[in-house]
Amino acid sequence: MQTSFLCRLFEIMMLLTASCTLFAQATSAWVYYDSNGNLQYAQDANGNQIIDYSWAGYEGGGVSLPSVAPVVTVNPSGDDDTANIQAAINQVSSGTPDANGFRGAVLLAPGSFNVSSTLNINTSGVVLAGSGSGLNDPNGTLINMTGSPFRLLNVAGSGSYSQGTQIAMTDSYIPSGATTINVADASGFNLGDSIVITRTVTSAWVSFMGMDQLFRNGAQQTWLSPGTKILTDRNITGINGNQITIDAPLTDSFDSTYLGSPAGTVAEASFPGRISQVGVEHFSVVAPNQEVTGAQYEAIAFSAVINGWVRDLNIQDTENSISFAKSTKQITLDHVNVIHTYAQSNSAAPVDFSLTGTQILANDCSVTGSGNTWPASTSSTGTGPIVLLNFYADDRGFDPHQRWSTGLLCDLCNFPNSYTSDKAGIAYSNRGIFGSGQGWDAGWAVAWNVTTPNLLVQSPPGVENWCIGCQGTVLSESMPGGDGTILPNGIYDSLGTPVTPGSLYLAQLNQRLGVAALNNIGYADVNGASLP
C-alpha cells in the first residue's frame, strides 16, 4: 500500500513538473515574435538565418491531402493477391486524369491480402487506398508480405532533370535562408519557371570542411567527390532586373572563397518523367520478422515524385521501411507508424524513415518497439526543407546519416530512450570515417523543442546547427577516426526550457498562409494542438 502511494505521488510530481515546463516557455534569440506578433529572425555576420520550413509538404505546405474517389475495388482472394492488385493499379493508370490530375483510386476492401512481390505505381494521379489501418480491425485492410524479402510498393517516375543554360550567380556569398539570387542575366527566366540551382563540390571546400582527412586502415575515405553537383529544385516567384526570387529558401550557403567563381549557377529545368498526385493510404502491413543479414522486407519507396503523400499506415516488422529519394519534392507523410516486434542484433541497423529530397514533411509519425533501428535519417546531399513534426521513436531518434543534407528541422519530437552517444535523440554531427567516410551529415539544421536524453549538435566549419528549447544532455565528441580533438558544439539556445512558439514549422506556416493552413494539416494552433 505504501509503495503504491509513493508511486502515485511520484507520478503526480512528474505531471506537475511537466505542466510547469509547458507553461514556463522562453524566447529564442534566433526566431521570435515582434510586438506585432510577426516572426523575426536573427542573422549571423554573413546573413545566414534559420530558414522558413513551412514550404515542406504536399503542394508546398498547408494544403489538405485529397480524398480521391475509387475507380476499382479489389477484394482479398485468400490466395496470392499480387497480380490482382497490380492489374487494378494498371487499369486506373490507363484512365484519363481529371482537372486536378487524378485518375482515381484503387480501393482495397476490408480483409487480409497476401502480396509476394513488388507493386508498382508509375503513373500520375493514382492512389492505392485501403479501408482502414487498424492491425486488428476486421473492417480494415491488412497486407501480408509473403515469400522471400522484397519491397511492397514502389512509387516512381523516371528520368532526371533536363536543364537549360547555366546562368552564373553574381554574389560572392549567398546565405542559407535566402530567397533572392542575383544572376548575370535573368532575361531568359519567367515567373513560375521551375529552376535548378547548382552548387558544385570543390576540393577547396572539402578541405575547408576537414573532409580530406578521412583515413581508415591507411586508406583514404571519400566524403563528397569534387565535381559532385548538389541540386536545389525551386520555382521563380519574382524577377527584378537580374535578381530572381524563389519560393522556398536556399538551405545552404554559397561561398565563392571555397566554391570558386561563380559560387553557383541557376538554370531553367524540367523533369518530364516525374509523376505527381500519387498517394498511399489507409491500410496496415505485416512482414515476417527476420534478422537483417541480406535482402529485407521494405515497405514503400518514392522516387521522381512531386506532390504525393503517404498517410494512415501501420507497418509492422519491415526494415528500411520508408525511403524518399533526392528526386522527390513536396511530399507529406502523415500518421505513418512503424512497429517492431523483433529486435535486430546486427550492428548495421536499418533506417525506418529515410527522407532525402526537398520540401518533405513527416507529420505525427512514429517508430515503436525495440527494433534496434535508426528511426529517421537522411541520405546524401538532400536540400530540404525536410521536417519531422511531432515524431516519436522508442529507440534512437533523428540521425542524419551521411554526406551533407541541409535545411533539416526536428520539431516538437520526442525520443525518450536515446541514452548513449550512438543513440543520440538528435545527432547533427560529424560521422567521420564511418561508412567509408560519411563525414559531416547535416548543416543549417534545427532541433526545436525536442525532448530526449541526449543531444549531439555540432558546428561544421563555416556552418551552424541549432538546438533551441530542447530538453536533454549535451554530448561533446570528436570526429570518428580523427585525432581525438573535441569538435565544437552548435548553437544551444534555451537548453532545458521550451521556447515559444511551440512549433517552429506551424508558426512559420501560420505566418505565411494563416490559421486555415494549420487546420488543413490537422492542427488548431502554432503550439501543436490537434484539431478536435
Image (cartoon, rainbow, N blue to C red):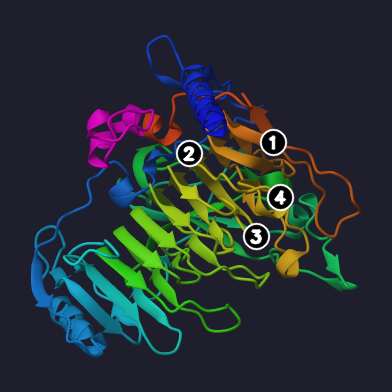
Q: Is residue 257 above or below residue 326?
A: above
- The mark lying in front, picked from 1 and 3, is 1
Read off the magenta span: 509-532
Q: Nearer the viewer, residue 77 or 461?
A: 77
Residue at 32% across / 29% down in the picture? Answer: 510
Image coordinates of residue 195 in percent, x first then y, are: 41, 54
Please tell me whether mark 1 or mark 2 is closer to you in this view: 1
Q: Residue furthest top?
A: 35
Q: Is 415 left or right of 531, judged from the image as shown?
A: right
Q: Answer left or right for 209 relative to 375.
A: right
Name the residue type under label 2.
Asp
User: To which residue does mark 4 refer?
Assistant: 420
Of the residues shown, which amino acid type is indicated by label 1? Thr
Q: Which residue is mark 3?
A: 403
Residue 303, quarter of picture: bottom left
Q: Residues within 10 Å of mark 4 (few under 14, many from 20)?
A: few
Instruction: Give the spatial CA distance, label 2 vs label 4.
Output: 21 Å
- Of badges 2 and 4, nearer the viewer stands 4
On screen, residue 37 above or below 372? above
* Among numbered discs 1 and 4, the one appearing first in the sequence: 4
**In contact (CB < 8 Å): disc 1 and disc 3:** no
Location of residue 280 by image quarter: bottom left
Which of the 4 quarters of the picture holds residue 137? Answer: bottom left
Mark 3 vs mark 2, foreground winner is 2
Determine whether, in the image, residue 100 is placed left or right of residue 226.
Answer: left
Q: Nearer the viewer, residue 90 or 189?
A: 90
Distance from disc 1 to disc 2, alpha carbons, whole Å, reads: 18 Å
Of the image marks 1 and 3, the number of the one nearer the N terminus: 3
The residue singled out by tag 1 in the image is 473
Sequence-wise, the earlier of marks 1 and 2 is 2
Q: Which residue is mark 2?
A: 411
**Sequence-first tag of 3 and 4:** 3
